[in-house]
Image (cartoon, rainbow, N blue to C red):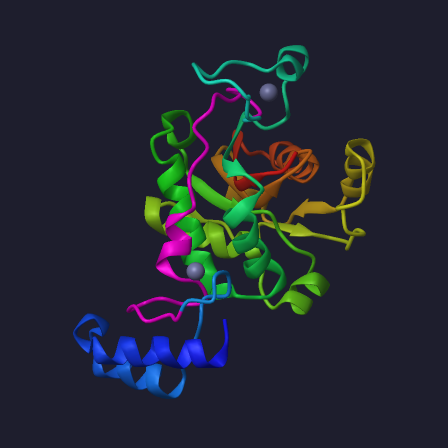
């Protein structure tokens, strides 16, 4: 969007200041106008940060059928059922649910959140996660605590925050559940997984996680939170460590599923 167009948009917004709401917002728009990082529109509504309300409204939950166990999306509609892989061998976690596929606006938002360090997007993304999955009784039934997939301290220092923790803390808050931060840690920093195959990811993650406070998880049904599910190697390794350290059951939620 050109500077002129932005200025025009700003004057239109200021002229319609009844819609803007507060004096503070008007001052912010006059002196520090900000624009949606995805579509370039002026952020002129109360509470809008980084991306506009219209872009957020484009986040839709996947409606097709999925595997009851690993949560993989099927191309077809109908009742959820077990996929071929889970029929042969069940994953270490009891179930996984994802909101949608890793593409379009959802992918753009996750990239902004994770790599451009817009931590403020955590609340909107967690709210989307909650809206998408709240009806799934199998996920929430008897759940006792929420636990994020940990980041290694060096990676956390680099990014400034752990994206899974930011999502997990809102999910715990929305649902009134205990948040278990620091019970599970990442002991060593493994190379980025993006270019690795499923088997390489499994090996890459082996032994990377450790439970430091087993009494915090003992006998509990946990909800493990991560941002993107690709092969499931990370959440499988975390679940195995949690179960070995005494957790009763581990269920997993992610924002998006990459294929
Ligand atoms: Zn936008
Ligand atoms: Zn499955």
> In front: 196, or 232?
196
- With respect to residue 98, does 124 lie above or below? below
Tell me the chief SS of the magenta region: loop
- With respect to residue 228, does 158 lie above or below? below
Residue drawn at point x = 42 percent, y = 40 percent: 60
Bounds of the magenta segment: 42-70
Corner quadrant of residue 10: bottom left
- With respect to residue 171, does 118 lie above or below? below
Give coordinates of residue 56: x percent, y percent: 40, 53
> In front: 46, or 123?
46
> In front: 125, or 183?
125
The quarter of the rendered structure image containing the C terminus is: top right
Give coordinates of residue 75: x percent, y percent: 55, 21
Q: Quadrant of ligand 1?
A: bottom left
- With respect to residue 185, does 200 lie above or below? above
Can the viewer see residue 176 in this picture?
Answer: no
Q: In this view, does 5 lie to the left or right of 88?
A: left
């Amino acid at each position: 969007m050109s500077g002129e167009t932005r200025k025009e948009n700003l004057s239109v917004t200021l002229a319609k200041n009844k819609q803007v709401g507060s004096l503070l917002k008007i001052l912010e728009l006059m002196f520090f106008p900000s624009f949606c990082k995805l579509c370039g529109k002026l952020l002129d509504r109360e509470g809008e940060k980084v991306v506009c309300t219209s872009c957020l409204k484009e986040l839709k939950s996947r409606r097709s059928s999925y595997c009851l166990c690993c949560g993989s999306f099927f191309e077809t509609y109908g009742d959820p059922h077990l996929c071929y892989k889970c029929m042969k061998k069940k994953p270490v976690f009891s179930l996984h649910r994802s909101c949608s596929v890793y593409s379009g606006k959802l992918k753009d938002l996750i990239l902004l959140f994770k790599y451009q360090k817009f931590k403020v997007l955590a609340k909107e993304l967690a709210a989307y996660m909650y809206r998408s999955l709240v009806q799934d009784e199998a996920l929430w039934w008897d759940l006792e605590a929420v636990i994020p997939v940990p980041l290694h301290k060096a990676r956390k220092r680099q990014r400034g925050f752990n994206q899974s923790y930011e999502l997990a803390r809102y999910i715990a808050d929305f649902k009134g559940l205990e948040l278990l931060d620091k019970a599970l840690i990442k002991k060593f920093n493994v190379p980025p997984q993006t270019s690795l195959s499923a088997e390489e990811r499994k090996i890459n993650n082996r032994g990377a996680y450790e439970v430091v406070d087993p009494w915090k998880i003992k006998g509990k049904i946990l909800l493990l939170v991560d941002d993107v599910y690709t092969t499931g190697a990370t959440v499988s390794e975390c679940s195995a460590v949690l179960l070995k350290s005494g957790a009763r059951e581990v269920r997993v939620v992610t924002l998006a599923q990459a294929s």
